[in-house]
Image (cartoon, rainbow, N blue to C red):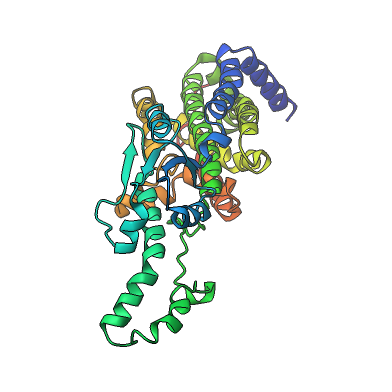
């Protein structure tokens, strides 16, 4: 046992004298904090700015309704026509709404065709949402008059009784009488735009960290495979056994990976939970590295496959987008990808962390099985 401890310490010392190790320890946290700096949560989750050019007279009721809908997602600002045009052109406002001077009279006549002019710029993205919001405000403005016309035309109410009915036509329904719409994500999470924007940045940083650590572990598998073919390894294996030596070298290689990952995850929302989730994640990939290292036919093609692994990691896990929503056939592959399990563990689903740990333990058992051949001393 003392020999293996000394062997592990020597392997760890060699790790920290390697330029590649220091590159990981420095560049991974820099990448994470740099990405967090370039994508600050405050800007990602900031509401969209929209300008509104009101007529000189009229439009107060419409603006009041529009202002009530101004909040976390969209903020409406009153402006002059020239100011609105400049702000949209500069990209400071997503779009702008221009009301005609005869806006109120057209509302009274229910002449709604071409009622607004919507200014958009090259980067405008939410103008469909703005258009729907404006339509809802206009509907509120004209609905009492439309209801009155319907009651009169249908002879439900006479001209003499309409005055008594009119206050009820302007009455706003209580919340329990309205049709309520609740939005949620595909995974069943309530759709809170600010929360989703915040978690999206953290999810991206966690996913990129997981992919880069996967690449590190795969390089470690190649190193272990090459080390097994060296004359020194052959002599040590004959004395101490292959499995124990591989475990010691692997453990030394995973220490800087865990340190680099922990430092990189300080930039995310829940750094402690994400760091703890690294333990089953690295256990799984470390066990996979042992399986690969013991067969040259497995680790030999890794240099050729290495450029494709980050791409596959991004596609087959919900780091940027969940492709299983677009292609349901990929659902099982996406759901059980180790990176997906790690992301879910970071989100609080420790059951997925246990799945990762169990799969890692199974792989470790497979890796430690006798190779079926004895090495020459």
Nearer to me, 306 or 157: 157
Q: 268 above or below 344? A: above
How far across and how far down the image is residue 212, in percent?
Answer: 50, 28
- Specify the quadrant that holds the N terminus: top right
Res. 88 image quadrant? top left
Residue 284 visible in image? no
Viewer-proximal residue among 17 and 298 = 17
Query: How many numbered marks are there?
Result: 0
Identity of the residue drawn at 53% across and 32% down: 209
Residue that appears at 62% across and 30% down: 251
Which residue is drawn at the image coordinates 49% and 37% (left, top)?
288
Quarter of the figure with residue 166: bottom left
Position above or below: 159 against 294: below
Name the spot of residue 286 as percent of width and height, x first: 54, 35
Residue 351 location in percent, x, y?
Answer: 58, 55
Q: Classify the position of the C terminus by image quarter.
A: top right
Farthest residue, direction right: 2
Residue nearest the observer in this picture, 371 or 16: 16
**Residue 248 seen in the figure:** yes
Q: Residue at x 47, y 54 (%)?
A: 60
- Seen in the picture, residue 310 relative to 194 is either above or below; the reply is above
């Amino acid at each position: 046992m003392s020999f293996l401890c000394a062997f592990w310490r020597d392997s760890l010392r060699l790790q920290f004298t390697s330029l590649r190790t220091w590159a990981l320890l420095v560049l991974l946290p820099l990448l994470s904090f740099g990405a967090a700096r370039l994508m600050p949560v405050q800007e990602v989750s900031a509401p969209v700015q929209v300008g509104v050019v009101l007529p000189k007279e009229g439009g107060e009721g419409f603006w009041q309704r529009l202002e009530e809908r101004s909040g976390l997602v969209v903020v409406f600002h009153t402006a002059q026509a020239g100011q609105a045009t400049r702000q949209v052109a500069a990209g400071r406002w997503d779009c702008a709404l221009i009301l005609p001077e005869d806006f109120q009279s057209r509302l009274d006549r229910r002449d709604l065709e071409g009622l607004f002019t919507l200014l958009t710029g090259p980067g405008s993205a939410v103008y469909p949402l703005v258009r729907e919001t404006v339509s809802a405000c206009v509907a509120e403005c004209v609905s009492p008059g439309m209801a009155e016309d319907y009651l009169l035309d249908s002879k439900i109410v006479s001209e003499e009784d309409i005055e008594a009915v009119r206050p009820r036509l302007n009455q706003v329904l209580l919340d329990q009488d309205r049709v309520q719409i609740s939005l949620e994500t595909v995974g069943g999470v309530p759709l809170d735009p600010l929360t989703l924007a915040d978690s999206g940045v953290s999810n991206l940083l966690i996913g990129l960290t997981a992919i880069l650590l996967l690449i590190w572990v795969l390089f470690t598998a190649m190193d272990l495979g090459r080390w097994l073919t060296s004359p020194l390894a052959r002599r040590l294996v004959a004395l101490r056994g292959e499995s124990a030596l591989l475990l010691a070298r692997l453990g030394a290689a995973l220490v800087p990976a865990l340190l680099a990952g922990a430092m990189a995850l300080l930039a995310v929302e829940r750094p402690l939970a994400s760091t703890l989730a690294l333990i089953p994640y690295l256990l799984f990939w470390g066990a996979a590295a042992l399986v690969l290292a013991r067969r040259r036919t497995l680790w030999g093609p890794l240099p050729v496959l290495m450029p494709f692994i980050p791409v596959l990691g991004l596609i087959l896990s919900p780091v940027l987008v969940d492709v299983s929503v677009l292609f349901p056939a990929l659902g099982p592959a996406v759901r059980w990808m180790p990176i997906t399990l790690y992301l879910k563990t970071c989100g609080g689903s420790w059951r997925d962390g246990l799945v990762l740990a169990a799969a890692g333990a199974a792989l470790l058992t497979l890796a430690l099985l006798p190779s079926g051949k004895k090495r020459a001393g």
